[in-house]
Amino acid sequence: MKYLLYTIILFTPAVCRADTFLMQDGARLEGEVTGEMDDTLLVKTRYGALTIKKADIQERKAQEAPPLPPAKLEISSAPAAVAPSTAPAVEVSSAQPAAVAEPAPSLTFATISPSTMTRQLVYSENGVAIATETFEASGGLLTLEGAIKDGTYTEYYSDGGLKTVKTMLGGKANGTLKAYYRSGALQAEAYYLAGGKDGLLRYHTEDGKVLMEASYRNDQLNGWKREYGPDGALTSETYYADDKPAAPPQAQAAPAAQAAADGGPDTQITVKTLELARGERFSFHLNGKYVGKVHLDKEYNLIRQGGKVPDGLVKVYTEDGRLVKEFLFEKNTLRALRVYEPGGPLQAEYGYEREKAVKK
């Protein structure tokens, strides 16, 4: 019997060209060049258009996806005869192979300044750009193209050193942001909530001294902003309310030695401390009249708060006038706590999230 055989050859044409840009900071961008000027390129990516400086490009190369090999399909009008086999039967199992854990994605971002008027943050996952934020010179967000995946992002210097670490949630900065010098020393640290600064912002010298510290709420200056010289001495301080200079809270009558050392406490609040089995209880008095209390455990977590403490910074002293703690209250809520060696340097600093002390 004759069998009719047909052979069909399928050809797939090559796909279109694309350009790949390897940036100086290690990021990789893929897209089509739609415009070019003397020192910049306009690149269209699947996440939107980017303007990049030629000086920021380490290597540019064109890629062309290779065509698929010809596929051969044979069709027969009858099944081919199967010769008897002496090979042993092979048992095929239907069990699924064990799942292999995939490595966690690498989330990075890079800062690009296409002009003096704007800057861009390009977010990447495993080296591939996924989103771009464009900011105006004053810091306001102009556009967001693509989607920023939730997670912790890192930025690196061109030599591979760690530059910045921040966490993104819902497309906005949330939690602690830390920036580093090329040497690896901490340069700045701030706390963000839903994209805005919320808490204490600090800048440090490369040898660890505080250059500036400022208190923020809702991305606006609220509280003291203090600047220090290279030797650590206070050079200026200004009190802010809703991003504008304002009259500070009136100073309380404090121990003379401490008042002379730091220019006087910040409020009229006095504090009485009582040690308990589970921690400490602090009672706050305004002009001698009880207004509120705070109970902290031994890890400085908030156990209980009562009464109403006025907004501002409240300092706690030992009986002989040495500073040991500073409480920051905003809207009758404990927002921060600083713990000092008695009369000495800062020992630790905490922010509060759902009554839990978070060390900064």
Image (cartoon, grey):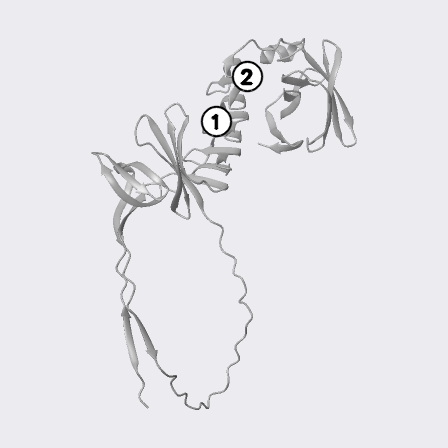
Please report whichever mark, 1 or 2, sits nearer to the chain's N-terminal start.
Answer: 1
Q: Is residue 142 visible?
A: yes
Q: Position of residue 156 (x, y in %)?
A: 40, 39
Tell me: residue 65, above or below residue 89: above
Residue drawn at x 35%, y 39% is 48
Q: Which mark is residue 125?
A: none
Q: Which mark is residue 224?
A: 2
Q: CA distance from mark 1 to mark 2?
A: 17 Å
Amino acid tagged 2: Trp
Amino acid tagged 1: His
Q: Nearer the viewer, residue 159 or 80?
A: 80
Q: Nearer the viewer, residue 228 or 30?
A: 30
| Residue wearing tag 1 | 204
Q: Quadrant of residue 115?
A: top left
Q: Position of residue 163 (x, y in %)?
A: 43, 36
Q: Locate residue 320 relative to residue 218 in the image: left or right.
A: right
What element does badge 2 sit on? strand
